[in-house]
Image (tube, rainbow, N blue to C red):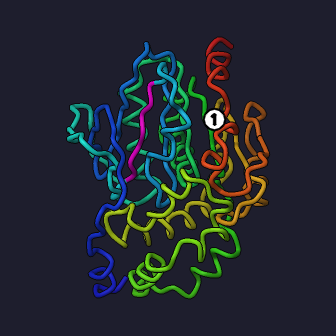
Amino acid sequence: MKASHVRKLIQPIESAYSEMFSGRVYRVGKGAVSVRNHSGKAEQTVIGVHGFLENHCYFTQAYEEPTTELILLTCSNYHIPVNGVTPETPDWEVPIKHLEGTIEYDACILNQAVANLPGTDNIRVHGHSRGGAVILEAIHQWPELYENVEVVLEAPVLPQGKLHGLVTTILEPVSHGMWPWLIRLINSAPSSAYGQTFFGKMNPRKKQLLSKLFSSTKDHLTIVRNIENIMDWMERTDTSVYNNVRHGTFLIPAVDRILDRKAMLASARQSPTTMRIVETEALSHFITLDDKEWVPGLETLQASAEA
């Protein structure tokens, strides 16, 4: 990549979205892990891994039970979307050797969280979109850690998957130098101009979380690196990564204009029979935001723990 492009791409992007958060935030490498306070005795632990250009608030309303310990990842070089909490550096943090902004790097953040933070033995890891790939990569890096962990992969980036044709058409002519310009253009356009096409029918929560997508990373370079690494990871990762996934669910939307739904299903069907494939009626890539009823109930966790 040309030095002049890198200079343009590393100009900082101001954080534009955060919510009140009660809990602790740990810095891990160039990312973070937030642990939400829960009012009841924790019966299960849910770890959420957000998707490309999203933030961890994606999961907060889907897991509101007072007995759920909710742990939320912030991927590398993304803004931490919390108010009123000072991040601390935990004593269990270990350096990460991968390049930041990649699925491999964020998988290391996830592994440190899974190894050190859960307060219960009933653990679910829920990843949306790119977050699904981060989970699969994390399991590939440290399979033993996930022997009793339930996995939810929602509209996930998968091995041998593809971007939707519409997205590919937009990305193909974009050179590195055009990114800052393109993002300014997108940010200045009313989201209704492209929102319906890519995001499906809007609702208040979707509007709140998806209207600030292009200010979720700390710089444009992270956006470019995320996209290039997603495409590269899908192409070079074999479906044998599923061999270490014990049990869980693929949530597939009825309509997806971000990822190629056919390729996603074909990949999911290569997974072990202990993984369920649920073809939801969600009409966009953002299944949880369309209707959190699609998220499997936490009783599945108890059942699998007893199995």
Q: Quadrant of residue 241?
A: top right
Residue drawn where x is 43% and y is 13% of the image: 41
Residue 28 drawn above or below residue 267: above
Position of residue 163 in the picture relative to residue 207 (left or right): right
Residue drawn where x is 20% and y is 41% of the image: 86
Magenta region: which residues?
A: 69-75
Residue 100 image position (x, y, % from top left): 35, 58
In the picture, the quarter occupied by the N terminus is bottom left
At label 1, the amino acid type is Val
Residue 38 drawn above or below residue 187: above
Residue drawn where x is 51% and y is 60% of the image: 210
Q: Which residue is mark 1?
A: 245
Q: Nearer the viewer, residue 71 or 95?
A: 71
Residue 88 drawn above or below residue 300: below
Residue 140 image position (x, y, % from top left): 54, 42
Residue 263 image position (x, y, % from top left): 75, 60
Residue drawn where x is 44% and y is 79% of the image: 188
Position of residue 102 in the picture relative to residue 81 (left or right): right
